[in-house]
Amino acid sequence: MGNDNKKNIPPSFLSQHLTGLHNSSTSDDSAGSQSLRNIFQSEFGISLQSYYMLQEAVYWPGPHRPITHLSMSTSPENTKFTIQNLKESYQTGEELFVMVHAKDFNNNSKDYGGDFFQAKLFWSKSKASVFGDVVDLLNGSYSVRFLLPWVGEAQVAVRLIHSSEAVQVLKHHRDTDSDRVYYNGYYEAPGPNKTRLNEVVECNVKWDKNGLESLGTKNCCCEYSDPRTRETWRCKKPKSLPCSALVYHSMGSYRNRLTKEEKALMEETNKGIRGNENIIKILHSPGNKTIDVPEKCRPGLHTPVPAGFFLDDVWTSFVCNIRHFTLQTTTKCLKDKHIYMMGDSTMRQWFEFFVKTIPTLKQMNLHVQYNAGPLMAVDVENNIDLHWRAHGFPFRTLKTAVASLHYISNEIDDLAGGPHTIIMLNLGPHFTTYPLDFFTLRVLRIRKALLALLQRAPDTTVIIKTVNTGYKDIFGSDWYSLQLNRVLRWAFQDMDVYILDVWQMTACHYSKENIHPGPIIIKNEIDVLLSFICPA
């Protein structure tokens, strides 16, 4: 989903922290490797081979020389794409290949990979588009493959999301600067004469490196360790109130520590690449099976590239046979269902869609801060109850009660499951600034909870929503999100769950990219979602 790599050289990004997580003393490499093997096998059921597969999935190549000036980085102006072996016409189901040649600002061809490109085939008049599969050849060239799925016309569009040099900036700050997003903790306690004492302090994830250790050491902080997940949230100690007085949580602010040179690299972001403007003519191919998707939706299906395409603003999936739902069929599909949504605001968009679409589904006023929830809606007539809650710390939100923030794995552990239970979850935008090992541990705990749930109630429906495109900056770049998606896919690929790919949908649609997709995309996401719940 983005750049695939011609070869993978896996770095070890998890072992450093995992060994320290369970053993605070310094260990040699052999002891660390053995500890890592034990942790993955005993706690999460992950083999060492599977662990190395994860390292390969998130590996990203970079420059093989020091970058001393912006002019040495990839120039979106000088970089070009060419259509390979262009024909007068094509048939549906055929493939089109494009080659991208990266050049720097001095118009020199680059001889290494690592640029983050996105590509799509589109035709504005028919509101048609499909995601392109970009493969990094590791020599400054990139091959892009397109499937031709609709009859009519099409053009190629390629964007440089980040240069390989800008990706190194993103990696560096993820590894050293994870506290660039921080949070507020609000402490309250009774004061004299029925007053309330208040203090606000900085809070963040407890982690022993990546810049998160800067909050302080030893007795600097109040620590809040969850007994089940063993994750720890910590806040600087208030001056006069006890640690037990923490009541509310909110987003704090951002710290932009980019240097002048790094800012220059990041400014060359999300730029269109020039190339062939030829109109591709696509004719109907009678009996072509390549774009037919007869398979019924079921858990565990592979997500291809492309995963589908838009035509007249309607998404056709290549994963399985999806339906397009009306008000009546939506209500019928959700009848007698207990629906638990857990994640961020992009998951909350699904909650809002159902509340707006189904007239008999009434949202309850739980008197909570809306952005963090929890939220609940009930349809007594059709016996539907719908729940959404945030995924717990870290969560960028307005001031909300700490007691309302629950970890997803704990919520799953507390559900009985069964044929009337549907679980939908996502993780992503609130984790972009944190190290991959922190996110991976969170995902593995959710995986472990889902495995237990599906063992006690195998007829429970579980749907994992991927991260969509949207952000392009140092606090939430699409490159960060792409890495998180790869972790999600790795963790859940062998389970009886549905993976709903929204990355390709948001990357190729004509609407302006937003971390909160517009109504057209949300409706198409819901059609895929309901097709998972009520397959054709």
Image (cartoon, rainbow, N blue to C red):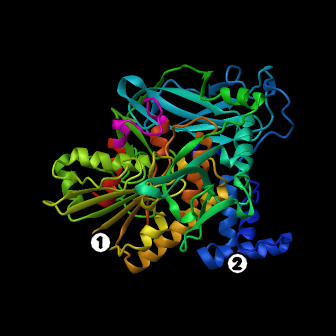
Please tell me which residue lies in front, 44 or 55.
44
For mark 2, what is the residue?
A: 38
| Label whose residue precedes the other's in the sequence (1 or 2) | 2
Q: What amino acid is at disc 2?
A: Asn
Question: Residues under labels 1 and 2: Cα distance?
Answer: 35 Å
Asked if residue 60 shows in the view, the reply is: yes
Asked if residue 527 shows in the view, the reply is: no
**270 sits left or right of 518 in the view:** right
Is label 2 in a helix, a strand or a loop? Answer: helix
**355 sits left or right of 25 in the view:** left
Look at 42% across and 75% down and name the residue there.
453
Is label 1 in a helix, a strand or a loop? Answer: loop
Please tell me which residue lies in front, 47 or 139.
47
Look at 49% across and 21% down and name the residue there.
279
Tell me the chief SS of the magenta region.
Answer: loop
Q: x%, y% of residue 99?
A: 65, 32
Q: Which mark is residue 262?
A: none
Marks 1,2: beta carbons within 8 A = no
Which is more foreground, mark 1 or mark 2?
Answer: 2
Which quarter of the picture shows residue 45?
bottom right
Q: x%, y% of residue 44?
A: 59, 74
Q: What's drawn in magenta, residue-wise?
A: 508-522
Outermost residue to the front: 193
For mark 1, what is the residue?
A: 419
